Amino acid sequence: MEVSLHHQASEIPLVHDALDELAARHRLPARCVARLHLALEEHLANIIAHGGNPGPAGTITVRFALEPAALRVEIEDDARPFNPLDEPAVDTTLPLEDKPLGGLGILLIRKSVDELEYRRAGDRNVLVMKSRLTAS
Amino acid sequence: MEITKTIERDNWELMVPGRIDGAAANQLELEVLAAIKAGAKEIFINLSQAEWICSAGIRVLLQYYRQMKTSGKTLLVTRPSPGISEILDMTGFKDVIVEGGPSGVAR
């Protein structure tokens, strides 16, 4: 299953709808699906807010592939090169007053999926998220 | 998504159901600002019916938690669903902004 969107936050729900449809059709475990929704929301919002909007011609493509025990989601975009995995980890143990409010999105992506892989393919960023389909 | 408000004098409860994505986070911020403007001394964000919350939503909670605290008022999350609880825990904010946590207050 594949969904394409423009660099507009108002189009992010198209991706959530596609994941809902896939989850319902294959009865995917609710917790894994909720986490994938969150990871997708964070990554897409980051691309749209910080990727240097390439304009109306720009596209983000999200591909879902069901594997025997996992759901693989590939997000490809034409924003400026950005590898979220290069971002330094947020220290979640700092007292609230010292805690930075940035970097939370990438932290949530890292903790919400089981595998993350980034590559630059030509002029596009490709992030692959993999979530193991376990019921717990 | 519809935020339900329950107001008792200076005490506001905002019930935020479903998925708290970027758009819902903006909506929540507007409701919190309206409560502050109306003179709320305590704002409780009830997340018992929420499924997940994105970083923009967490930033709204923290920003107004800090702002309210600075002026001697309270903003706390109440009754987080298991999904929300887990997400807040991941970020290290759960003990701070959930009612009944070490720095939280009991109602």
Image (spheres, coloured by chain):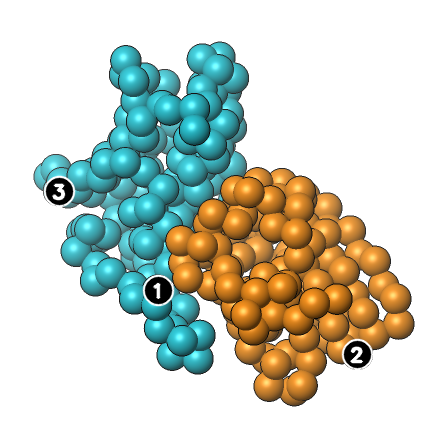
Count neighbours of disc 3 (C-alpha within 10 A) and say few if under 14, some if 14 to 19, many if 20 or more: some
Discs 2, 3: same chain: no
Foreground residue among A4 and B25: B25
Cα–Cα gap, marks 3 and 1: 29 Å
User: In which chain is the residue bearing label 3?
Assistant: A
Q: Is residue A17 above or below residue A59?
A: above
Please give left or right for residue A79 compared with residue B33 in the image: left
The residue wearing badge 2 is: B39
Q: Colour of chain B?
A: orange
Cα–Cα gap, marks 2 and 3: 51 Å
Count neighbours of disc 2 (C-alpha within 10 A) and say few if under 14, some if 14 to 19, many if 20 or more: few
Residue A29: percent from left, percent from top: 46, 23
Secondary structure under badge 1?
loop
Q: Which part of the image, by quadrant, shows the C terminus of chain A?
A: top left
Count neighbours of disc 1 (C-alpha within 10 A) and say few if under 14, some if 14 to 19, many if 20 or more: some
| Camera-nearest label, 2 or 3 | 2
Secondary structure under badge 3?
strand
Please give left or right for residue A90 compared with residue B107 in the image: left
The residue wearing badge 3 is: A120
Please give left or right for residue B101 compared with residue A91 in the image: right
The residue wearing badge 1 is: A92
Q: Colour of chain A?
A: cyan
Please give left or right for residue B6 compared with residue B28 in the image: right
Q: Is residue A55 visible?
A: no
Q: Quadrant of residue A88?
A: bottom left
Amino acid type shown at disc 1: Thr
Q: Earlier in the sequence, mark 3 or mark 1?
A: 1
Amino acid type shown at disc 2: Gly
User: In which chain is the residue bearing label 2?
Assistant: B
